Image (cartoon, rainbow, N blue to C red):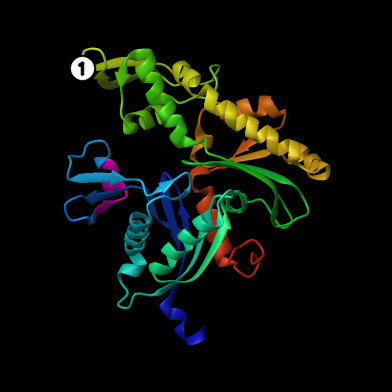
Amino acid sequence: MGFFDFLTEEIAIDLGTANTLIIHNDKVVVDSPSIVARDRTTGKITHVGKEAAMMQGKTHENIKTIRPLKDGVIADFDASEKMISMFIKDIPALKKKWITPSLRMVICIPSGITEVEMRAVKESAERVNGKEVYLIHEPMAAAIGIGVDIMQPKGNMIVDIGGGTTEIAVIALGGIVCDKSVKVAGDVFTNDIIYYMRTQHNLYVGERTAEKIKIQIGAATEDLELPPDDMSVQGRDLLTGKPKQVQISYREIAKALDKSILRIEDAVMETLSQTPPELAADIYNTGIYLAGGGSMLRGLDKRLSQKTDLPVYIAEDPLRAVVRGTGITLKNINRYKGVLIK
């Protein structure tokens, strides 16, 4: 490299189903919803990120909002590539450059991903001028981001609840010993709330409203120490077709999400049952770490703790734990060579 170093920029990307985050020079420079808006008449991508998210559920027939990533993997290749390139162009430091720099990237991927899906991520990155592209598994990045020393001969259990997938992994000696990836996460919670509102209140609400309900009063158990206030929800009455408003409490949302959270609990129990005995002894002492946006659901840590009889800790900034870990690996590529997939 040497002389051409100034032409190369390093970025770390957390390509999430719900949000995409990019780190450049140790700062989170992009934190946007993974949504694009496409003009149907021209076929061009008109808006990405926050602007496209504002349009969701409010478009006319000429504009379509797409979420290019589904269950943590690329579902729409063209849209995701455009989205990544537009996000990279948004990085303030790269806007000032005359020459488009070549990029060294570390991108995180779900642990249950197939070879074909992996190649799709890699090719998308190469098309936006990625000269060196490394991939890292999400639970691994989350562990590094939380501050766990993954190189030690000591077992740590990470549960990363994202938008599309929940990744559960037991990590030791810089590798994943056993892992499970379930497609129950933030998006499923949102759909559960939509379904509950339809069946219990005859109220048809959109995805954005359901997301808002989840954030404001979402809960995993009905006995919370600090319960949130009730919330007014507006939508369309399915019986009369008129717009209407209802009051809902966190207890109702806890009921609505119960089945999905049970599936996450079962996956955690299954992973624990596959853990080698020496590592299980370590996990008994260290507990379970939660990362990802889904871990912010009220009472989820308590519920998992009751189920597993282990202490459960939430990362201090769960939404950014994965991208922070990806950024740390980017800075110390030589140290984490064994963890990265070239």
**Residue 6 visible at all:** yes
Toward the right, the furthest residue is: 278
Q: Which residues are magenta?
A: 46-54
Residue plotted at (45% across, 16% down)? 252
Magenta segment: does it hold 48? yes
> Can you give x and y, in whole percent of width and height, for residue 231 in the image?
36, 20
How far across and how far down the image is residue 7, in percent?
41, 79
Spot occupied by residue 205 in the image (x, y as percentages of width and height): 31, 25
Q: Residue at x 56, y 16 (%)?
A: 223
- Residue 73 percent location from the top left of the image: 47, 50
The quadrant holding residue 274 is: top right
Q: Which residue is mark 1?
A: 241
Residue 177: within the magenta? Answer: no
SS state under label 1: loop
Q: Is residue 318 left or right of residue 35?
A: right
Tell me: 114 left or right of 312: left
In the rendered image, which quarter contains the C terminus? bottom right
Circle 1 crowding by C-alpha within 10 Å: few under 14, some 14–19, many from 20: few
The foreground one among 334 and 116 is 116
- Residue appearing at x 69%, y 35% in the figure: 270
**Up/down of 312 relative to 20, above or below:** above
Vertical position of residue 325 compared to residue 231: above or below: below
Image position of 264 with respect to 131: above or below = above
Three-letter amino acid code of the residue under disc 1 = Gly
